[in-house]
Image (spheres, rainbow, N blue to C red):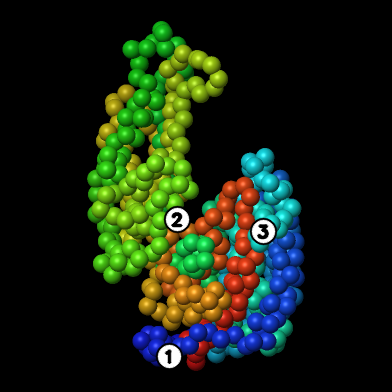
Amino acid sequence: MGMKKIFGMDRIQHELEIAMVPHKVVDEISANSQQYVEELAEFLRIPSVSTESEHAADIRHAAMWVAKKLGKLGFQAELHETARHPVVFGHLLVDASLPTLLIYGHYDVQPPDPLAEWITPPFSPSIREGYIYARGATDNKGQCLTYLMAMEALLSVTGRLPLNVKVLIEGEEEIGSPNLGQFLQKNRELLRTDVIAISDGSQFAPGIPAITYGLRGLCYLEIQIQGSNFDLHSGSFGGVVANPIQELIEMLSRLKNTDGIVAIPSFYDHVLELPPDERLEMSRLPVDEMQLKKYLGVEQLTGEPDYSIMERKTARPTLDINGIWGGFAGEGAKTIIPAKAGAKVSMRLVPNQRSSAINEQFKSFIRSIAPSTAKIQIAEMHGSDPVLIERNQPAMVAAAKAIEFGFDKKPVFIREGGSIPIVGLFKDVLDCGSILLLGWGSPDDGAHSPNERFSLEDFHRAICSVAALFYSLEECYRT
């Protein structure tokens, strides 16, 4: 591509001023703030629930809405069909000598259930006390649109963008992006870029913007234990046959020690320990333990005793039982020995753990502790490797300056405890290490929950930050 370093990181740090957007662009963003909210509300009214086949037409409606919006901005935009939901891709070539920014987002949303807990209908956007409430408000329609609105303002005032831009908005993120990897592999050349921007997360805390540089990976498995051929009368067969639920519970109880350390042999062998300077930086993040316990409704927090709350939440591996079933759980009594039982177990992974290796370690351990009476099946559900993005690079500096411009506050650098498989895909398939994870939302926005919301003030700040990002990236990387 046309991007290359023109000076070292130390010079960037000292000489790059806060990314300054022309005053007319800022004025344009402010003048059109109500219009932007109205367009967001229009987008939010589309019930683009990707997991439910009854919303297939709504999914396509949302995809076409995005493509039409890109077309109005002068992009060459089209829908790329996949085995399920289409990918929207658009590109605007300004000058081959300029760097290229790829913007990623998703137009699909989670189901709105439980409906009874919504104060206003999930697909009828409502504005209350400075927030817009609707399914998809923060995840990811609101955050995604900040890029399109910023480009609209830039084009309206200056007639051109400071960068070449590619936009990839998919419709399957909420179901694990099953077809995106194939799309990336097939279209590597089309998607070739210098920097990737993803805003599908949150700030560190309300009013504390952040740049995420680390994501945990995921290893998700399901265990099923088969006992007898069918449920048995506990009076007739109790004491004669093994109980699958009992066997399952005993095995699950051996996965972790009482101090929260995972007991699977070799589980920690390749864990990349946090360096002292990063631990010190994490210790300075404002974490209110009492407030956190109050918010969660728990009396105490648990986990590895030698690590802080932030380290345990974001930079240490974990193991959790996500669900368990078996036997009779209905109203009243039913005296049976169940024929089968099962559980779902997830493990969050950190650099340099690998999902495939942890999968095998887990299976081997379960089989080693299983009683001879247990007939076990273990299925792999989901998996992704952790991601660690180099912080000492020009794109990170540019993003920090842009966020400071839009939010009037320096961002903190954080790791995120969750997993975003698409980041690893981008890094590996497109061979791009400059990935900016810029969360415009707030941790209390209620993504995936009833009454999901997005702060209109943060929406406005984010649009200004994106506009600044275009200029600061062009400044950092120049032919």
Left or right: residue 56 compared with residue 401: right
Name the disc covering residue 381, or none: none
Compare marks 2 and 3 and give the one earlier in the sequence: 3
Residue 407 pos. (x, y %): 54, 74
In the rendered structure, the answer to whether residue 144 lies left or right of residue 267 reads right
> Alpha-carbon neighbours of circle 3 within 10 Å: few (<14), some, or many (≥20)?
few
Q: Secondary structure at mark 1?
A: helix
The residue wearing badge 3 is 129
Residue at x 46% of width, y 88% of height: 16
User: Which residue is depicted at the point 30% across and 44% down?
Assistant: 260
What's the mark number on residue 418? 2
> x, y percentage for residue 279?
30, 64
Q: Position of residue 332 (x, y in %)?
A: 53, 16
Between label 2 and label 3, give the one nearer the viewer.
3
Measure the alpha-carbon separation of dots 1 and 2.
Answer: 35 Å
Q: Up-down: is 93 above or below 113?
A: below
Q: Is residue 436 visible?
A: yes
Residue 164: x and y in percent read 59, 82
Reading the image, the residue beneath label 1 is 15
The amino acid marked with disc number 3 is: Glu
Mark positioned earlier in the residue sequence (1 or 3): 1
Element type where label 2 sits in the image: loop
Q: Which comes sooner in the sequence, label 1 or label 2?
A: 1
Considering depth in this image, is 388 or 67 the residue closer to the camera? 388
